[in-house]
Amino acid sequence: MIQTGPATPDDATLTDHGLTAATGGRILLLACGALAHEILAIMRANGWTHVDLHCLPAKLHLRPDLIPDAVERAVRQNRDRYARIFVVYADCGTGGLLQARCAELGVEMVEGPHCYAFFEGNATFAAHADSEITAFYLTDFLVRQFDAFVWKAMGFDRHPELIAMMFGNYETLVYLAQTDDPALDARARAAAARLGLAYERRLTGYGDLVPALERAAR
């Protein structure tokens, strides 16, 4: 089943935006559903009419071991329709397995360990990573979907006593903001309070995702 529009956290199907029947010189961005909003914004800003977006369910991040196989299936299903496929995932907790799988398939992917790093900029994130081991990061997507991907996924709605157990070593919730949205800022601040953490917001924009997609779209 093909649905039109960006993937939602509860969407278990593959999702497309603007797919066409003719391959021609078209490029496919095969992406995590958690990045759909940002990728579509970059596509619109650049006027890329030769680029299509195909999203896998964002909930795969709750089981990173499933990501390589899901990416491979999607690549194989779509490769005859496109001149090029670019995988818009970082390592995302796969321990290098996704990079190895992409190499086997002959497709490129975004550099970086996770979206926190490439949104802030991989070099910038790496420079302070050792000093922020007590930081818990959120992006725009995770702020919007905090209940689904953090609160309920970790069982805090049923067992609030788990918060101290799972977040006892964290000190700060760092919101890496892709957009300057006061409403999201307020929601991120509230999430920090719910977890008992200090709050910090950094406006990163789209970071290294922009040059990565620009290279892929050429």
Image (cartoon, rainbow, N blue to C red):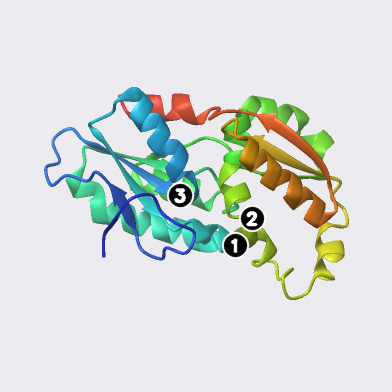
Marks 1,2: beta carbons within 8 A: yes
Quarter of the figure that contains the N terminus: bottom left
**Viewed as shown, does residue 65 lie left or right of 39?**
right
Residue 146's disc number = 2
Label 2 amino acid? Phe
Closest to the observer: 47 or 190? 190
Label 1 amino acid? Ala
Marks 1,3: beta carbons within 8 A: no
Image quarter of residue 49: top left
Write the residue at 58% across / 62% down. 62
**Viewed as shown, does residue 168 lie left or right of 113?**
right
Is 195 situated above or below 31? Answer: below
Label 3 amino acid? Cys
Going by the picture, which residue comes out furthest to the bottom? 158
Q: Residues within 10 Å of mark 1 (few under 14, many from 20)?
A: some
Marks 3,2: beta carbons within 8 A: no
First reached walking from the N terminus: tag 1 or tag 3:
3
Counting from the top left corner in percent of width and height, residue 26 is at 21, 35
Counting from the top left corner in percent of width and height, residue 118 is at 57, 33
Residue labelled with disc 3: 32
Residue labelled with disc 1: 148
